[in-house]
Image (cartoon, coloured by chain):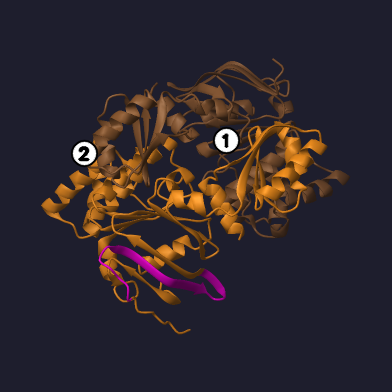
Amino acid sequence: MTTHHLPLTTYAPDDAVIAENLTRKFGKFIAVNTISFRVARGEIFGFLGPNGSGKTTTIKMLLGLLHPTSGAANVLGYDVVHHPEKIRSMVGYVSQKFSLYTDLNVIENLNFYGRAYRVWGKQLDARRQIAIELAGLVGVERELTANLAGGFKQRLALAAAILHEPQLLILDEPTAGVDPVSRRDFWKLLYRLAAQGTTIFVTTHYMDEAEQCHRLAFIHEGHIVATGTPSDIKEKQMRGSVIEIDCDPPGRALEILRQIENLDETALYGSLVHVVARDVAAQQPQIERALRDAQIAIKSIAVIPPSLEDVFIARAKG
Amino acid sequence: MTGQITATQLSKTFRKNQAVRGVSFDIAPGEIYGLIGPDGAGKTTTIRMLAGVMDPTRGTARVNGLDTTRQAEQLRAHVGYMAQKFSLYGDLSVRENIEFYADIFGVRGKARAERIARLLKFARLDQFQDRDAGVLSGGMKKKLGLACAFIHRPRVLFLDEPTNGVDPISRREFWDILSDLHIEGVTIFISTAYLDEAERCSRVGLMYRGEIIREGTPIALRQLVQGDLLAIITPDLQIAENVAQKLPGIFEVQVYGDRLHVFVDAGATRAREIEIALVAAGATIKQIRPAAPHLQEAFISLISHL
């Protein structure tokens, strides 16, 4: 296997991450397939996709832990293949399985990670204090990590990752399994970091968090299938239109609608039915007719704006 | 009460901790009832009591007409229960796991093979039936868990956070399977921390600190938000957030990529005040308009006013 790295000719100082045709194969399996994207400094960039779609492989390449098969990536001005150590000293990384020492307290954990990143003495004391305040850990400094609630553990992991004042934070599903209120607090913290100039590259399965990113890329089976701001994606990148139907009984309606060909998606939302149609003008009358023939009363039928999830599912289907 | 699931003042105390504080339900046959709330709200304890696997400290519940405490044994035949951390046999195949549950629930005879085949197809697992359960993706494990919980064709399913940690595409598929069950008339009681999933339920109970603080259809719950929601689209988010937070009549400010969501006591007046204050602070406003809150926001707004 030859490894060829394209020169990145277009690097600009306000780029935090550039990926150009980045590809990684494992044997015959192409985990990441010629993806290109750019993350500007200070941006909160959401990298979304189902499990196994290539997210973690991409992150590993950005961290210089895994070499690309082809294509190139540049992080904070450094090529990921040639200067991984430079990159790692400027990046904070919180993985899905970030390990905190549960038998150490908050301060002890932070001291441990600070030293691992070669932050010592008074500098460590000062930065630890800043991290504790920023992450909302004031009052639990002496608490054993094992006794912290889920949301606090996530914030402690983040505090540990910012002790060396990284310019870029890479967060791999940092809020998995965390409740809505703690997740919102965690995002407020991300916004504070971004406002200070830290670039944030984050993966999540929560669509409400995706909405909070400045820009998004959605990766599916190794390809980026949608990218842009959340509004742009919802307004311009949907394949087809979502039609919402209020009818009775909705369950029976769903059965009928599933028999209509060429509807991309039929789903029940409480008492409402959502369908995705490529051609509303032609398909809406067809839907109405099918429901009427089955003696299902339509209370209302209208095209509604798609959710981010609607767009991703439509784009993933190709 | 004539509901498929009914409960009166159900409570559970663990030593001094009152996990569930007098919750009542009346759920009709065929409903998808969503129990929504943060961690530690009491969702799991509630589900365990309703499914008859844990006795309440006080109060009673009936499922399918059976008392969940005194008739717990009989109840087992009529309910399916998928625990949050259910166990599958990792070294058995998908099919063998389902066979195992079929044995436990005494599914025998001619119906058995047909039912297993149907369930595999139903859970979209037929192509993976010979794969070891241990190597399945998170989403597939959940689907297998659901198939196992449904092997004896119960009329009522209790699902405790079945989509936790599952990616959006698998989550959508899981809900499509639940819709199929709903169409067949199965009553589904499901807990989740994903508030967007509440939109797929017939009715939702918001649980917080052991109590059901609100209950209703997803549409009704969204309208419970106090005051009005304004969306402010601006490139100067940080300035806008700092300024907006300090103005009178503001309940809550949330940042979303290219916009702020601001909950205010009176939309029309506050919109103008915010606009003046932001412009004075040097922020550019592209647009300021009323917006419809998501359930996520409705919930957070509700609990921050308790």
Please tell me which residue lies in front, B179 or A107: B179
Mark 1 falls within which chain? B
Q: Residue B199 carries which label?
A: 1
Residue nearest the observer in this picture, B75 or B41: B41
Indicate which disc, 1 or 2, sits on the residue closer to the N terminus. Answer: 1
Which residue: 51% across, 36% down?
B195
Colour used to depict chain B in the structure image: brown
**A285 sits left or right of A99 in the view:** right
Q: In this view, does B212 lie above or below B296?
A: above
In the image, taking residue B270 as reference, residue A226 lies left or right, namely right
Q: Residues within 10 Å of mark 2 (few under 14, many from 20)?
A: few
In this rendering, does residue B151 appear at all? no
Quick one: B148 or B255, which is closer to the camera?
Answer: B255
When asked about the image quadrant of residue A84, the answer is: bottom left
Our reading of the magenta stretch's main secondary structure is: strand
Q: In which quarter of the image is the C terminus of chain B?
A: top left
| Type of amino acid at the residue the image marks with label 1 | Glu
Q: Distance between the residues labelled 1 and 2?
A: 38 Å
The residue under the point 25% across, 38% down is: B279
Tag count: 2
Kindly indicate the quadrant of the structure image that contains residue B188.
Answer: top right
Whole-percent x and y of residue B186?
72, 33
- Residue A148 in the image: state x and y as whole percent: 35, 38
Which chain is in orange here?
A
Q: Which mark is residue B281?
A: 2
For the record, the magenta segment spans: A9-31
Q: Circle 1 sits in a helix, a strand or a loop, which is it? A: helix
Q: In this view, does B230 lie to the left or right of A90?
A: right
Query: Which x, y percent locates residue B294?
Result: 48, 35
Picture layout, residue B204 above or below residue A255 = above
Subunit bearing disc 2: B
Q: What is the three-letter code of the residue carrying label 2?
A: Ala
